[in-house]
Image (spheres, grey):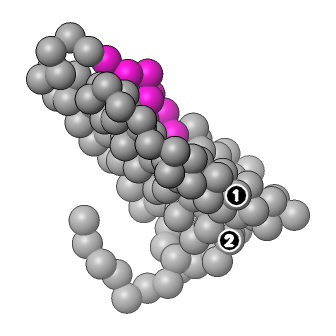
């Protein structure tokens, strides 16, 4: 990863889509390696974690780009934060399931991530 002095609104669609695709691939690889060493115990949350950046980030931004919409700017930051929270929450939930335990605090990831993604896309599409 790199840091950029440019605000999110000045980044191109291509950079954001690339970042989401890379996140999806890394989540898929992480899930595969984790499942490999989990002694044949698996979790749908771990296996499906790659789908969150793909379905909530890469595809919607690609569709916005194809429709010729301007980059959403600050609203995109809410989407990015929400997708990150949902992805981390999914991986954490999967790790806990594989370990054989649970934690009620994982619900915070789902609530916060869902709220951030919802508000971000509502502001983007208004």
Nearest the viewer among 25 and 34 is: 34
Say above or below: 72 vs 65: below
Give the residue drawn at x 38%, y 22%: 43
Query: Element at badge 2?
Result: helix
Image side of residue 72 versus residue 10, left or right:
right
Magenta-colored segment: predominant secondary structure: helix
Give the crowd class for mark 2: few <14, some 14-19, many >=20 residues within 10 Å.
many
Distance CA(mark 2)–CA(mark 1): 13 Å
Residue reaching furthest top?
40
Span shown in magenta:
42-53
Give the residue drawn at x 44%, y 42%: 103
Query: Element at badge 1?
Result: helix
Q: Is residue 65 visible?
A: no
Nearest the viewer among 6 and 43 is: 43
Give the residue drawn at x 53%, y 64%: 81
Residue at image mark 1: 115
Location of the N terminus (image quadrant): bottom left
Residue 89 x, y percent position in the rendering: 45, 47
Nearest the viewer among 20 and 14 is: 20
Location of the C terminus (image quadrant): bottom right
Residue 20 x, y percent position in the rendering: 43, 50
Q: Which mark is residue 75?
A: 2
Q: Earlier in the sequence, mark 2 or mark 1?
A: 2
Residue 98 x, y percent position in the rendering: 30, 25
Foreground label between 2 and 1: 1
Asked if the residue under mark 1 is in contact with the one under mark 2, i.e. CB atoms within 8 Å, the reply is: no
Q: Is residue 110 visible?
A: yes
Say above or below: 83 vs 24: below
Q: Is residue 64 magenta?
A: no
Say above or below: 100 vs 8: above
Image side of residue 57 versus residue 21, left or right:
right
Give the crowd class for mark 1: few <14, some 14-19, many >=20 residues within 10 Å.
some
């Amino acid at each position: 990863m790199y840091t950029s002095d440019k605000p999110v609104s000045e980044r191109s669609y291509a950079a954001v889509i690339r970042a989401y695709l890379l996140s999806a691939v890394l989540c898929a690889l992480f899930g595969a390696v984790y499942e490999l060493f989990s002694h044949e115990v698996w979790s749908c949350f771990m296996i499906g974690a790659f789908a969150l950046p793909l379905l909530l980030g890469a595809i919607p931004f690609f569709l916005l780009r194809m429709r010729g919409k301007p980059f959403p700017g600050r609203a995109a930051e809410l989407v990015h934060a929400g997708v990150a929270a949902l992805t981390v929450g999914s991986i954490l939930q999967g790790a806990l399931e594989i370990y054989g335990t649970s934690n009620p605090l994982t619900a915070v990831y789902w609530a916060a991530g869902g709220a951030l993604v919802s508000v971000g896309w509502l502001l983007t599409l208004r």
